Amino acid sequence: MMKDQPRKEGPYFDGTMSYLCYQEYLQSDEWKYKRDMMIRLRNYECELCHRSPSDLHVHHKTYENVCNERVRDLMVVCRKCHEHLHSKR
Ligand SMILES: [Zn+2]
Ligand SMILES: [Zn+2]
């Protein structure tokens, strides 16, 4: 059986399949590894305010390639900037 591939759903998930995939994905070792890699790549700094808090987040600029992100699809941000990114729609 082939695993369901996430489809283009726009900036937020409406499709149940890709949403579930995403939720599961965020718990996976694969994502943890990618997250660590991104944070290291950005020198443990928030890309927006350039501070280095201990709790850096990795934000998806686009959900187009979720589960198969490229570096340019992701952004390393601190908690504050991340909340800000999600609060404006
Ligand atoms: Zn920040
Ligand atoms: Zn985000």
Image: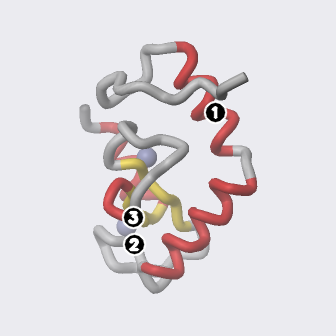
Q: Is residue 51 placed above or below 83 in the rendered structure?
A: below
| Ligand 1 lies in quarter | bottom left
Which residue lies at the image location 33% right of the left edge and 43% below the top edge? 62
The amino acid type, in three-letter code, at marker 2 is Cys
Q: Which residue is mark 2?
A: 46
Cβ of mark 2 under 8 A from ligand 1: yes
Label ID, residue 23: 1
Give the class, few, some or many, for how many residues have Cα within 10 Å of label 1's Cα (few <14, many ≥20): few
Coordinates of residue 34 in the picture (x, y in percent): 58, 63
Give the class, few, some or many, for how many residues have Cα within 10 Å of label 2's Cα (few <14, many ≥20): many
The reply, left or right, for residue 89 in relation to residue 70 is left
* Distance in Å between CA atoms under marks 1 and 3: 20 Å
Which residue lies at the image location 73% right of the left edge and 48% below the top edge? 28
The amino acid type, in three-letter code, at marker 1 is Gln
Q: Which residue is mark 3?
A: 71
Q: Nearer the viewer, mark 1 or mark 3?
A: 3
Coordinates of residue 58 in the picture (x, y in percent): 49, 58
Q: Residue furthest left?
A: 89
Sequence-wise first label, 3 or 2 = 2
